[in-house]
Amino acid sequence: MATELRDFLQLSYAELEELNLAAKAQRMARTPMHQLREERMKYLTDEKRIKAVTVLFSDLEGRLHMLDYDKKFLLKSVDNLTFDGSSIRGFTAQRESDLRLEVDWSAFYWAPADVFGPGKVLVFANVLDKDGSPYAADTRGILKQYTEKLYKEKGYTLNAANEIEGFLFKGEHAEREFYRTGKFELVSPGGYYHSLPGDLLRVFIDTVAEVQRAMGFQNEKDHPEVAPSQFEINYSYTEALAAADTIQLYKLVCRQVASKMGLTASFLPKPIVGINGSGMHTNISVSQNGKNLFWDPNGEENLSELAWKFVDRILTHANDICLILNASVNAYRRLDPHFEAPNQIIASPVDRGSMIRIPLSNERSARIEVRSVGPDANPYLVMYALFRTGLEGHISDMPNLRQAKRFLPDNIYDAIEHFRKAEWTTVLLGEDVKARYADLKQAAADRCPRLLGTMVKVPEVQFHHEVYNQYLWSLF
């Protein structure tokens, strides 16, 4: 079909970066939503080369969903963007299926046309119930409400950055074909410093990094990781809701770039037994009026009393929230002490087997690093659970809490049991959403072998919440 008649928006990477960084600066400055709405809608009206707006939202498990709205339709109907919630696992029952999307104009992105297609822009949205109130199972909305509440009441800004590891496999649908092949094929035998500049892994990393820069991620470093065919592409610290949105975009970009190369970017925590798994180390801190509240030059490891109480609360509730941080059957294979697994419920500046590491830092960078998070976890739930637990949870009177030899669950059944029994998870999510989340995880676990053994089983890949197959799920 001829393309010369189509005059759709296609911007250079430099132009994209400039636009996205300006939008990011507005977001960090907390520009009022009504002002952003007016600006963005005027831009969409005036920019004739935009044909559609991709609206992004996430379900209870953190799976990203995308709806393309015709631009002219969206401009006329932005206050009434309805969709069928019964088709989203963990959302409404069929008899009460209508839900709405509320566009978050602060989370607006221009994306490279050669990766996402010309004439489109992206924007995140929150989910509303039929009556227009925030939908109880919308974890992005839960996090947004919490961050805004803390900023309004205490002037707190919650900050986060994530180090997200993944694997690059041969074949465009390696995860979906696993039931047939029973294996993943690595694209590169190299690890940390062993991948040559022109091999497929390095080309993939370079391409993803270019897209990230264009989308305003503000990259820091990128490199192959320890395991062969493993990657990590780091970017800058930001406010917690923006950080969670960025995780969703990071995985989307990785998958899209890999697909265009005829490959698969996988965020299974432990796709291959015998080599290191993938984590999502989560660096977090709290600031107030630009001051890092975790920093104290005279404190232990240069952390403040607030920061250490934050650590103690997470350690106290480690088992309670483990199912949120490690959300799949496969995640518990990663918590293996033979591969630097962060499965010990301790805090340490040096021990990489600890759940929480205290990085070497200064006044600007003082933070804690929660290492036990899997890359397939719902980023909005992760941020919400960690920050609310760290600020509001209980502190155990256990002697030597930070170094007592305790371990996270080594299987999802134990994690589900801890999650269901914990009073704290009811405080976090409420009884209804807590039960929905636990039931989803129970269903996934029951479809997989209880005894994990030494081999990755087909069901734990095939029924993984990020490897969605409507036909298979409909059989249950």
Image (spheres, rainbow, N blue to C red):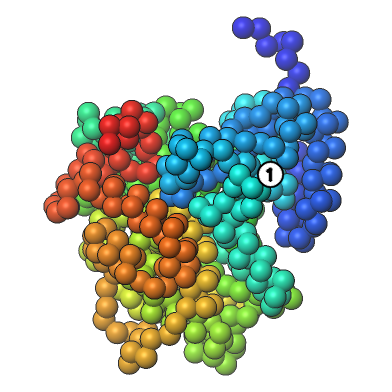
Q: Which residue is mark 1?
A: 103
Horizontal side, residue 162 vs residue 328: left or right = right
Instruction: Using the image as rendered, state which of residue 449 and residue 269 is in the foreground.
Output: 449
At x 81% / y 51%, what residue is drawn?
34
Measured as percent of width and height from the top left, residue 91 is found at 47, 45
Residue 29's quadrant in the figure? bottom right
Instruction: Using the image as rendered, state which of residue 226 and residue 453 is in the foreground.
Output: 453
At x 62% / y 26%, what residue is drawn?
117
Measured as percent of width and height from the top left, residue 208 is found at 54, 41
Measured as percent of width and height from the top left, residue 307 is found at 53, 81
Measured as percent of width and height from the top left, residue 389 is found at 48, 73
Instruction: Using the image as rendered, state which of residue 433 and residue 336 is in the foreground.
Output: 433
Is any atom of residue 82 visible in this view?
A: yes
Q: Is residue 349 above or below residue 283?
A: below
Q: Is residue 17 above or below residue 84?
A: below
Taking the view exactly as shown, the residue that stands out farthest to the front is 95
Q: Secondary structure at mark 1?
A: strand
- Dot 1 amino acid type: Val
Q: Is residue 372 above or below residue 87?
A: below
